Image (cartoon, rainbow, N blue to C red):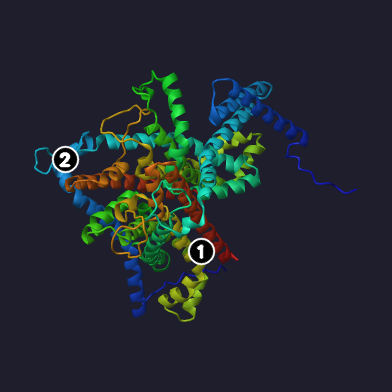
Amino acid sequence: MTIAPPIKREMHVVHSRGDKVFRGIVTAGALTSLVLLGMIGAFLFARGVEVFSTSGFKFLTGSNWQAGSEDGLIPNDFSIGPMLVGTVIVSIIALMFAVPMSMAGALYLEFYAPPKARRILVGLLDLAAAIPSLIFGLWGVQVFTSFGERWSYFLADRLGWFPLFSTISDNFGRSPFVAGCVLASLVIPITTSVAREVYSRTPRELVDTCYALGGTKWGAIRTVVIPFGKSGVVGGAMLGLGRALGETIAVYLLLNINFRYTFRILESEGGNVASLIATKFGEATPDELKALVAAGFVLFVLTLTVNMVASAIVTRSTKAARA
Amino acid sequence: MQAVPTRPWEKEKSVRRRSTATLLLGALISCAIVLFTGFAGPDGWAVVLFTLAAVFTFVKGRKLQAKERKNAKAHLFILAAAIVAFTPWISIFISVAFKGIKGVRLNFFTSDMRTTTPDDFMNMGGAAHAIIGSFIMVLIATVITLPLGILSGVYVTEVRGRFSGVVRFVIQSMSGVPSIVAGLFVYTTFVDASGTFSALAGSFALGILMLPTVARTSEEVLKLVPDDLRSAGYALGARQWRSTLMIVLPTVRSGLITAGILGVARVIGETAPLLLTALSNTSFVFNPIKGPIGSLPMYIFGMLQIGTENSINRAWTGSFVLLLLVFGLFSLARFIAGKDKR
C-alpha cells in the first residue's frame, strides 16, 4: 500500500484592517522610488523639451554651443555632438584598461595570491570601491598627470603615425587619454570586486577535475573559470561603463572641454556631457540652462539604459550560478 | 616514530629562496638600467623589470613542456596586470595619507575660512564649517531616505506585493543615475521653486543617490530573516503588521543601521550634485533652508581649483579627513553587521 503524499493546503489570506493600512503604507513607501525615478526623467524632459523641439536631431549631432545675446542678435545654438562622442571615447579608453586589468586582478586574488595577502587585498579593495570620485580627481591632477603626460609623449613620439595618437601641439595634460586612465582607476575596484565575486562561485569540483586530468592552473582558468564567469564579468564591465559615462567631477578636473569633433586622444581637448553641465552651469543664461537640462536628460537616458542592461545581465548570471 | 605532517604541494625552502633571490637581482638590474639609460621614474622601472621577467620566463620555459610553459607565461602576465590594477588605489591611499596628514591640526577642525585666504599657512583657518555642513546635509538625507529605503525592503520581502519585481528593478537602475543628473533634477525643481541654494536642496540630491544603497542593503538583510520567525509570529496570533514591526524588524535592527551607514558612506564624498544644489560657503551656516552652505567635498574641490601650494595642501588634508570618515563608516558598518551574526 502506498501512502499518498500530503496535498499542499491552499492558504487563504484575509488581511485585517490594520494589515491593510500597514501594507498600504509600505507599498506607498516602496513606490516612492518608482515615482522619483519617473519624476527625474519627466522633469528633465519637460525642461529640456523646448531645446529638443527647436534644435531637433541636430542637438545630438551638431558641434556648436553658443548662448544667444539678450537682444536676440546672436541666436541661441546648442548641440552636444562632440560631448557625446567624447563621453564615449573616454569611457571606452577607461574600459579598455579596466576590464583586462580587473579580470587579472580578480584571478590573482582568487587563484594566485597567498591567503594572507588575499585577505588584506580584498579588504582594501572593498574600501577602494568606496573612495569618492573627487579624491580620484585630486590624485589624477596632482599625482597621475605627470605619468600620463610622459606616457602620452612616448606614444606620440613612437606611434604618432597612428591617427589616434597623432598630435598637433605638445600639450598632453587634460587629454581624453589621461582622463580615461584615471576613470579606469576609478572603475577597476568596482569591476574587480564583481569579477572576483563571480570567479569565487566557480564550482570547486570543476577546477579540481582539471587538475586531476593533469591540467595546469592556467589550463583550469582558461577552460573553466573564465567561461564560467564570462557573463558576470560582462555585467560588471557594463556597471563600470555606467559609472564612467556619468562620472562628473573626476573628468571635470582632468579634461579640457572643446566643441569640436576630435579623435586625437593625446591632445588636451575632448568632450564630456557630465562635465559640460558642471562647467557651464555657473554662468549659464536661462536658455543655456534649458540646453544643459536637455543634455542632462540625454545623459540620464544613456546611463539608465546601460545600467538596466547591466543589471539584467548580472541578475541572470548570478541566477545561473546559483542553479 | 611520530609522523611529521608535510605539505607536499608547497615549494621547498631552497626553491623559494632561489626565486626571491632572482627577483631581487632582477629588481636591482632594472634599477641600474633605469638609472643609467633613458628610462625614468617608477613606471620605467616597472617596465624594465617586467621585460626582464618576461625574458627570464621565456628562456627558462624552453626546457619545459608546452603546457607548463603556457602556465608560466600566464602566471607572469596575470601577476603583472594585477599589480597594474592594484597600483592606482594603493597609490591613492598612500598619497592621501602622506600628503594629507601634514595639515591635520586642531585649527583644521575648529575654524572656518571666513578670515583666512586659501593661501595662508596651514595653522590658520580650517574646514570646520565644511564638516558641519556635510554633517547637516547627510543627516537630513538620512532622515528622509532611511525610512523610504527600509519600506521598499519591507515591501519586497514582507508584503511581497505585485510590484516587487518592478521596485527591485527600479532601485537597481536608480543606483546608476549619474550624480550630476540628480543635482540637475533638484536644481530644476526645488532650487528653482525656493529661489535659493540650500542645505535642504543638497540633502534631496544626496538622498536620491543614497536611496538605492539603503533599499538594496535593507532588502538583503531582511531576506536573511528565517521564515520560521514570521510563522512563529502568526502562530502567536499576530497580524502581519505586528509580526513585521515587533519581530522581523527588531531582529535585523543592526542590519538596518548598517544599511543607513553604507548609504551615508556612499554619498558623503559626492561633489557634483552639491555643485548644483548647495554650492559652498566660507563660514559656518546652520540654517538648512536658506543660502549656500559649505561641505567637505566642495571644500576640497574649491581648494583644488584655487591651485596655490597651501590651498592644495588644504585639499589633501580635506581628502584625508573625508577618506577617514568613509573608512570609519565602513568599519563601523562591518563591526555592527558582524555583531549581528553572533
Q: Measured along the vertical axis of the image, is residue B249 above or below residue B7? A: below
Q: Secondary structure at mark 2?
A: loop
| Most foreground residue, B119 or A133 | B119
* Position in image of residue B241 (x %, y %): 41, 76
| Label 1, label 2: how far apart the Cα atoms are | 51 Å
- Residue A281 horizontal side relative to residue A15, left or right: left
Three-letter code for the amino acid on which mark 2 is drawn? Gly
* Position in image of residue A127 (x %, y %): 52, 50
Q: Secondary structure at mark 1?
A: loop
Circle 2 marks a residue in which chain? A
Q: Which circle, 1 or 2, is nearer the viewer?
A: 2
Residue B157: name its quadrant.
bottom left
Quickly name the residue at label 1: B224
Residue B171: name its quadrant.
bottom left
Q: Is residue B262 visible?
A: yes
* Position in image of residue B202 (x %, y %): 33, 58
Quickly name the residue at label 2: A56
